[in-house]
Image: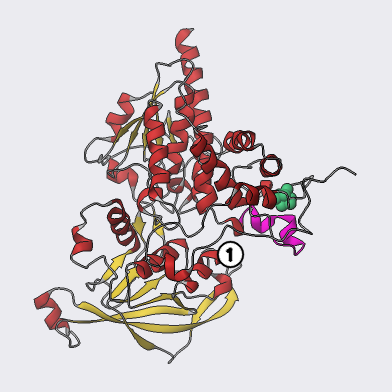
Amino acid sequence: MATQTMLKFVSTPREMPEKRSAAERSDDFHEIYREFAAAKAAEQSSRCSQCGVPYCQSHCPLHNNIPDWLRLTAEGRLREAYQVSQATNTFPEICGRICPQDRLCEGNCVIEQSGHGTVTIGAIEKYITDTAWDEGWITAALPAQERGESVGIIGAGPGGLAAADMLRRQGFQVTIYDRYDRAGGLLTYGIPGFKLEKDVVMRRNRLLAESGVEFVLNCNVGEDISFDAIRGKHDAVLIATGVYKTRDLDIDNAEAAGVVRAIDYLTASNKVDFGDDVPDFADGELNAKGKRVVVIGGGDTAMDCVRTAIRQGAQSVKCLYRRDRANMPGSQREVQNAEEEGVEFVWLSAPGAFTGHVTGVAASAQERDVDGPPQIASVRIQKMRLGQPDVSGRQSPELIDGADYDEPAELVIKALGFEPEDLPRLWGVEGLEVTRWGTIKADFQTHRTSLPGVYAVGDIVRGASLVVWAIRDGREAAEAITDFLSGAARVAAE
Ligand code: SF4
């Protein structure tokens, strides 16, 4: 009987790449998993049962052809595996690192469902594309023929970059405008290096620049250049700004010094990781070193904050979340990593007030008027229980009267989620329709907005969502823009 390459899930146990010890990884911002060796990647790939209806693929927003690249990896045909992988995904090595696979492909793998432990899809995806980079298989995509039409993209996050890559391959002239000094959006300044090392993002940016994509950085649309000017310069415009406005708290002393926004905290930490001068980090405002830190929130951004605080040398790190572990939005794998690193989760807890002090004594309203906002001293924690499910099906948290207590803290990080900025007002644009949530109205397939030739993708349309959805949107919008410009070119030629 011929030797079977695949279906080895019964005889071969699931293995992730080796994870660095919590003590070792808590001292630096490097990724926590070591690389698979070639033999291990092949072995783990061979566990796949090559399902006729692959649920891994149908639950992947990009519909990645996972069974095929697993089989090619198991057979040692890595270059072909890379080709199959990159056919549907612009940044497979980034998705391999940061997708919440336990909620997507791996969570729906039939082997997982049958109790044998999922195929380690994300780790293998990362291995394939990291190998492609090492082997020099990834080179700048130079179009066969240049085209005269140009596309302006506002926002250099994953949606904008994915669209830029596809449009440039078609020969369009592509310019990306971004408010930050480096491209990548949250990939660069939101997600910490221990999940996504910065070189991994920067080499993608370099590749796009080599392919002819022009980056206009430090450029705030509405201030440095108007939206109308961008529209006037380009034949089509793609809005891919993401959402950056932080949800806030309406409680006593909400403005206390030492209460900071997650986006500011993570951006400062990532800039320090790049070797930049960051005054707000140097003066201690955005540095957790030696502090008792409380992070409020239960999503992936909160997980990034708690684990960053550990690496900065916080005295203690507590994460407050108003529901329980089973009902939190963040990845369970991230919670486990955080717990291993010393983070304490305080479930069923919400902040009721912040208490501040001026010079070590509780601040009165009068003192605050004189001296500005007090320094955070503690968080009043309100205990919750889960009540009836709400319209979303999740149980609503209810307050338990009389169970409050004070948790001392010198740094409080608000990771309560992000909301869209009011772009039509900020940019002074008439006719750009938004939803009642403030997100831009766009067709979910073509990503066309209410303005002719203007498209929008990613979080500014969906609300805060996953990187992989932004990549999918960017790729789809690039196709729609190509059709639009090709149609427009045909009409002009007729
Ligand atoms: Fe392989 Fe799991 Fe996908 Fe089935 S669901 S094809 S076993 S990875």
Is residue 314 at all visible to an observer of this figure? yes
Give the answer, above or below, for where 492 lies relative to 141.
above
**Residue that protrudes farthest toward the right in the picture:** 1
In depth, the one of 142 and 463 nearer the eye is 142
**Residue that protrudes farthest toward the top in the picture:** 494
- Residue 403 spot, x, y in % from top left: 44, 90
In depth, the one of 461 and 61 nearer the eye is 61
Q: Residue at x 38, y 28 (%)?
A: 210
Give the answer, above or below, for where 353 lies relative to 457.
below
- Residue 251 spot, x, y in % from top left: 32, 76
Regarding mark 1 in the picture, which secondary structure is present there?
loop
Task: Using the rendered view, name the quadrant where residue 205 is placed.
Answer: top left
In depth, the one of 414 and 233 nearer the eye is 414
- Taking the magenta stretch, the answer to whether it contains residue 222 is no
The yes-or-no answer for disc 1 within 8 Å of ligand 1 is: no
**Quadrant showing the N terminus:** top right
Question: Which colour style is shown?
Answer: secondary structure
- Residue 417 spot, x, y in % from top left: 41, 61
Is residue 152 at all visible to an observer of this figure? no
Badge 1 amino acid: Ser
Q: Residue at x 21, y 38 (%)?
A: 224
**Residue that protrudes farthest toward the left in the picture:** 370
- Residue 450 spot, x, y in % from top left: 44, 36
Q: Which residue is label 1 attached to?
A: 392
Horizontal side of 237 relative to 3 (left or right) equals: left
Task: Using the rendered view, name the quadrant where residue 142 is placed.
Answer: top left
Region of the chain picked out in magenta, as a range: 104-117
Q: Residue at x 61, y 46 (%)?
A: 38
Q: Residue at x 18, y 65 (%)?
A: 283
In depth, the one of 457 and 289 nearer the eye is 289
Horizontal side of 281 relative to 329 (left or right) equals: left
Give the answer, above or below, for where 171 lies relative to 52.
above
